[in-house]
Image: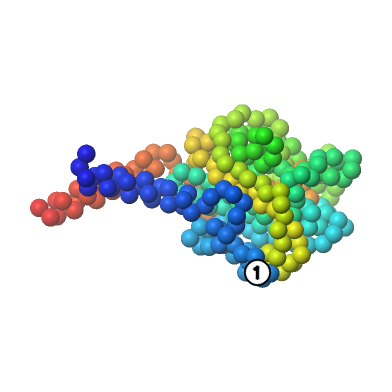
Amino acid sequence: MNKTVMRIMMLAGWLASANAQAIVIDGNLAEWGLKQTGQASDWTPDTAIVPSARQYTVEDQTGGANTRLFPGWGGQAYDAEALYVSLDSNFLYLALVTGLSPNTPDNPAANSYAPGDFAIDFGLDGSYEFGIQTTGPDAGKVYQVSEWHYGLWDVNGDHNPANPDLLHPTSMKTTTQVGIGSLVYTDVPFTNMGVYTSDKHYVIEAAIPLSSFAGFSGKFDVHWTMNCANDWITADPELNAIPEPATLALLPLGLLGLLALRRRAAA
């Protein structure tokens, strides 16, 4: 193979994987540009990783079990604090900060609710076609979802388990597995992030292959809540829509086209 062509193919591969090299799925938020200095600015990500303000949401609250989050209560222990979304040519990256420990038992009789799953809505129509398991031995697996579980609250924020708000799915119910990614849910809390310096935080970090979403492209939302839906959070990747697979294949071809034009101009 011509050395110049080989270099262009290598460049295409580097462009596709540059962001993947920057984010290691280990629960360390420093790679996202986030900090632990006890300042509000701790929540602001590196724009090289999260270039748009719509690609992340911060809703840091604090308080005890009787503190309302909206729609439910629970304070810091059930706080969905921040969600960050990043995208490159191969992977969807997620980083979630929450006060909810992964070891929280799912025992509604004792007013205890476990973490839910990531829900992904293509077309921004509230349908949530895909889910990503966040806990247990299947954490990181990706599923196409035909049926979800929901929380305790209706569209008005009232306690109404019989008529829950369908815009806030909690965990997957009826599924077909379509892929598997890497996911870490840290179980050792850390403090000193944001202005509530004594609050304990946990991280869910994931890298999901875009091939898991075969047949789907364009704009999408990412949503997360716990099984009671006491507090939910969502982020919109905005311009970083998932492209059609054919578009990804055009990258090296485009670079080869530029090479051909350069050679013609030189001649």
The x and y percentages for residue 114 are 77, 43
Q: Which residue is mark 1?
A: 37
| Left or right side of 244 for 57 | right
What residue occupies the far front of the structure in this picture?
A: 188
Residue 119 figure quarter: top right
Amino acid type assigned to the residue bearing label 1 in the image: Thr
Q: Residue at x 59, y 49 (%)?
A: 26
Looking at the picture, how far across and down is residue 167, in whole percent? 70, 45
Q: Residue 230 appears at what percent x and percent y?
A: 79, 50
Residue 168 image offset from top left, x and y in percent: 71, 45
| Farthest bottom residue in view | 39
Mark 1: which secondary structure?
Answer: loop
Residue drawn at x 53%, y 36% as measured from the top left: 212
Residue 254 visible in the current orientation: no
Instruction: In this rendered view, identify the residue nearer to me: 13 or 89.
Output: 13
Q: How was the colour assigned to the protein in this rendering?
A: rainbow
